[in-house]
């Protein structure tokens, strides 16, 4: 049978060794690589229906996989005004005013990507935005995805006029007189106002998701580890695949929130393996804390405001029980843990679960997400316990500064801010480090993620790097977005290498990413993206 796809005149890059394979061509059929060889012999395999592409010396590597992103919920969230490029309040107010001018009376304004650093020394509060939102119901997501800023009118419509108590770590921030400032911390508080705000239709979310996924494919992504199944996420992925419009492969981890009982855990276990050809439920996403920027992380010592002292789970022992139940069922967990106390509790919980159910040759591959600050004694535990370190280097690049004048660093203080995002230390200690974006928290282009891991600089490359000793090498960064995502998913037998029988998920670049300068890597052209042997992006002229 003729292959579906033939790629000729290629340089085939092995992310395992960093070297080029001796072959110059490959063929794919049935979603797998079927042949490797020279141009003449592989071209001869092509039939009338085969797509044949001459790559003219371009570099083919294993398809890029984002280790942590939110494709469907992120698509919905980014339907409002984009504030991610606003670096001060003047810019924020101008962007909001432009959108307000286009609104019909009574319509809601939604925004996203608001950086608390834009407020400078002013409080993160609706009043700091001035009169631009007077009378306008508005709900603006801060960049961290764990807090929103609600206008006075939005609070009125939601009936929010003072503090409330929640079963999980969450807060309606109020001033000294008990009046809400507009800042809402964590889901339970945010959902009160979100419940009265209009939502896009299912068709609108599906269309926006399709648009985002096409952009991801054009950036070179062939897959992602989706860290939620919120709303209609699974239905939208299924519908897109049924229409032949799903250009990425997804591994989906639904959430488990505090208060989950035995029935809820049993349902999460039952969901495992549900999916289609390009997506499946695998694992469970949990939260051990919030974020440093809004004072809801779990730190071993309080931050400079006396905050970040509590776990997201009011009873951390209940989290430990859930991990034990999932581990016993062979279900891997991915836990959001940013602060040092949160990371330690996750590792302690995994260690206890492993002791209760020793390995039987098929390890349960747990992982920790984010790991923004940890002490020395925590670093070697990842490798010892077989827990992967899922990290987002662009969070360090885009939202912290080398001089520690940013909100994140000021809250932590010099000592803890100096051990930020320890990618290199964890790698050298033997941990499996997986790289991702956490989109929409940070931009999704994988070349930008790898570049951030290598140079640790913000978008302005003239600024100094934050923690250059924690930078990864070019080969480590490549493995972190190709080989290691396959390993933590348990897919190393069918993904992560260019070899006959492996998945035909491929990213084609204009040059060798291992030889491109760190500061030039983000701009390296993506010429072709292939998922399951099918081109999902093809540059003009190729």
Image (cartoon, helix red, strand yellow):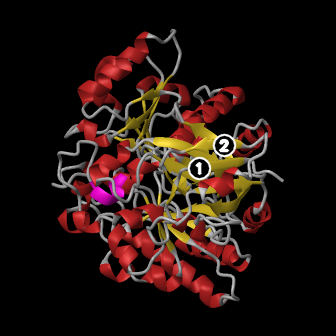
Query: Seen from this angle, which residue lies furthest front?
Result: 40
Query: Seen from this angle, which residue lies furthest right?
Result: 1
Magenta highlight: main SS: helix
Residue shown at 48% from the left, 48% from the top: 58
Determine which quarter of the picture holds residue 121.
Answer: top left
Q: Is mark 2 on a helix, strand or loop?
A: strand
In this view, the residue in front, 376 or 184, is 376
- Is any atom of residue 399 visible in this view? no
Residue 286, percent across and down?
58, 62
Mark number, residue 532:
none
- Disc 2 to disc 1: CB gap under 8 Å: yes
In this view, the residue in front, 72 or 318, is 72
Question: Vertical placement of 523 versus 467: above or below?
Answer: above
Q: Looking at the image, is mark 2 or mark 1 earlier in the sequence?
A: 1
Residue shown at 49% from the left, 78% from the top: 347
Tell me if 420 is positioned left or right of 356 in this view. left
Determine which quarter of the picture holds residue 236.
Answer: top right
> Which residue is identified by label 2?
52
Tell me if 402 is positioned left or right of 348 in this view. left
Residue 69, percent across and down?
53, 50
> Which residue is identified by label 1?
8
In this view, the residue in front, 153 or 403, is 403
Residue 362, percent across and down?
69, 82
Residue 454 lies in magenta, yes or no?
A: yes
In this view, the residue in front, 37 or 416, is 37
Residue 440, percent across and down?
48, 42
Question: Vertical placement of 146 versus 85: above or below?
Answer: below
Rounded to the nearest angstrom, the CA distance separating label 2 from label 1 is 8 Å
Residue shown at 52% from the left, 83% from the top: 385
Q: Give the range drawn in magenta.
A: 451-456
Q: Is mark 1 on a helix, strand or loop?
A: strand
Residue 458 lies in magenta, yes or no?
A: no
């Amino acid at each position: 049978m003729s292959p579906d796809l033939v790629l000729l005149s290629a340089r085939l890059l092995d992310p395992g060794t960093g070297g080029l394979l001796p072959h110059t061509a490959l063929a794919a059929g049935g979603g797998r690589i079927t042949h490797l060889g020279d141009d003449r012999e592989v071209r001869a395999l092509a039939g009338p229906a085969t797509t044949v592409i001459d790559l003219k010396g371009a570099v083919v590597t294993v398809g890029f996989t984002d280790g942590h992103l939110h494709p469907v919920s992120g698509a919905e969230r980014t339907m409002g005004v984009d504030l991610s490029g606003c670096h001060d309040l003047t810019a924020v107010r101008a962007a909001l005013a432009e959108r307000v001018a286009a609104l019909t009376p009574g319509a809601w304004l939604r925004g996203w990507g608001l950086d608390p650093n834009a407020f400078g020394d002013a409080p993160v509060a609706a009043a700091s935005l001035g009169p631009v939102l007077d009378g306008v119901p508005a709900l603006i997501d801060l960049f961290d995805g764990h807090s929103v800023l609600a206008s006075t009118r939005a609070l009125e419509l939601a009936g929010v006029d003072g503090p409330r108590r929640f079963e999980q770590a969450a807060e309606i921030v109020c001033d000294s007189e008990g009046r809400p400032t507009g800042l809402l911390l964590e889901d339970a508080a945010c959902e009160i106002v979100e419940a009265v705000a209009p939502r896009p239709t299912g068709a609108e979310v599906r269309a926006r998701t399709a648009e985002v996924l096409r952009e991801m494919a054009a950036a070179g992504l062939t897959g992602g580890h989706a860290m939620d199944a919120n709303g209609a996420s699974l239905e939208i992925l299924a519908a897109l695949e049924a229409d032949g419009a799903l250009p990425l492969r997804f591994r989906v981890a639904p959430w488990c929130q505090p208060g989950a009982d035995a029935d809820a855990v049993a349902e999460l276990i039952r969901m495992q393996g549900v999916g289609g050809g390009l997506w499946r439920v695998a694992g469970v996403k949990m939260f051990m804390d919030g974020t440093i920027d809004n004072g809801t992380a779990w730190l071993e010592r309080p931050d400079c405001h006396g905050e970040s002292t509590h776990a997201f789970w009011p009873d951390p022992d209940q989290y430990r029980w859930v991990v034990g139940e999932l581990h016993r069922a062979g279900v891997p967990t991915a836990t959001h843990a940013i602060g040092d106390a949160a990371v330690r509790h996750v590792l302690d919980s995994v260690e206890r679960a492993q002791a209760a159910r020793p390995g039987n040759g098929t390890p349960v591959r747990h992982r920790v997400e984010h790991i923004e600050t940890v002490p020395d004694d925590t670093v070697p535990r990842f490798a010892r316990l077989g827990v992967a370190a899922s990290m987002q280097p662009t969070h360090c690049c885009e939202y912290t500064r080398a001089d520690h004048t940013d909100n994140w660093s000021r809250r932590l203080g010099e000592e803890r801010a100096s051990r930020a995002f320890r990618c290199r230390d964890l790698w050298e200690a033997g941990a499996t480090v997986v790289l991702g974006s956490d989109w929409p928290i940070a931009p999704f282009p994988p070349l930008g993620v790898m570049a951030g891991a290598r140079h640790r600089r913000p978008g302005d490359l003239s600024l100094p790097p934050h923690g250059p000793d924690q930078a990864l090498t070019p080969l480590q960064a490549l493995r972190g977005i190709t080989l290691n995502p396959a390993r933590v998913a348990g897919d190393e037998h069918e993904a992560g290498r260019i070899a006959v029988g492996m998945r035909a998920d491929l990213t084609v670049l204009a040059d060798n990413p291992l030889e491109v300068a760190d500061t030039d890597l983000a701009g390296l052209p993506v010429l072709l993206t292939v998922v399951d042997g099918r081109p999902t992006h093809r540059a003009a002229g190729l």
